[in-house]
Amino acid sequence: MRNSGLADVLAPGEGAIVVLVSAGKGRVRIHSVHVKVDSIKFIIRDSKHDLLYKTPRPLATGLVKRKMLKVMEGAITTGLKYIDGHLVNRMEMGKAEEDERGSGGDRRC
């Protein structure tokens, strides 16, 4: 027996709550990221055999929720580290430009 379909995963209500714990001042140093989702709805569309998906739905919902939380935490952590890297690069470039100007570059009296 073969079957295929599409899955919609919805987080109704408040959606996701993200708690960031920063490890320092100035830079975006993330100590930990916690994502909380109250509930999710798991809907299967365009399938031929609905009974196959209705039976293990509670198990599948729990697995999808755990995986979704891990993926969201990882994506947020990676994104913030990426932003931190860009900020550090910009700050270093700005300092280098200030040093060049202050060391006797183009001065007019």
Image (tube, rainbow, N blue to C red):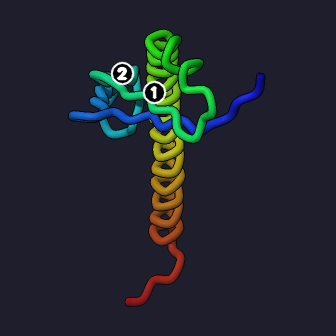
Looking at the rendering, which quadrant does residue 30 occupy? top left
**Residue drawn where x is 49% and y is 10% of the image:** 59
Residue type marked 1? Glu
Residue 109 appears in view: yes
The image position of residue 31, as x and y in percent, is: 40, 21
In the structure shown, which secondary structural element does the residue marked by tag 1 occupy? helix
- Considering depth in this image, is 34 or 65 the residue closer to the camera? 65
Up the image or down, 85 lies above or below 73; here it is below
Q: Residue furthest right?
A: 1
At x 76%, y 27%, the residue is 2
Residue 36 image offset from top left, x and y in percent: 31, 22
Location of mark 1 (residue) = 73
Q: Where does residue 63 sit, x and y in percent of width and height?
A: 51, 14
Labelled pair 2, 1 in contact (Cβ < 8 Å): yes
Q: Is residue 21 visible?
A: no
Identify the residue at image location x=48%, y=37%.
Answer: 8
**Considering depth in this image, is 90 or 11 the residue closer to the camera?**
11
Residue type pointed to by label 2 = His
51 relative to 34 in the view: left or right: right
Answer few, some or many: residues within 10 Å of disc 1's Cα (few below 14, many 20 plus, some between 14 and 19). Answer: many
Which residue is under mark 2?
34
Q: Quadrant of the C terminus?
A: bottom left
Expressed as whole percent of the image width and height from the top left, the position of residue 49 reads 61, 27
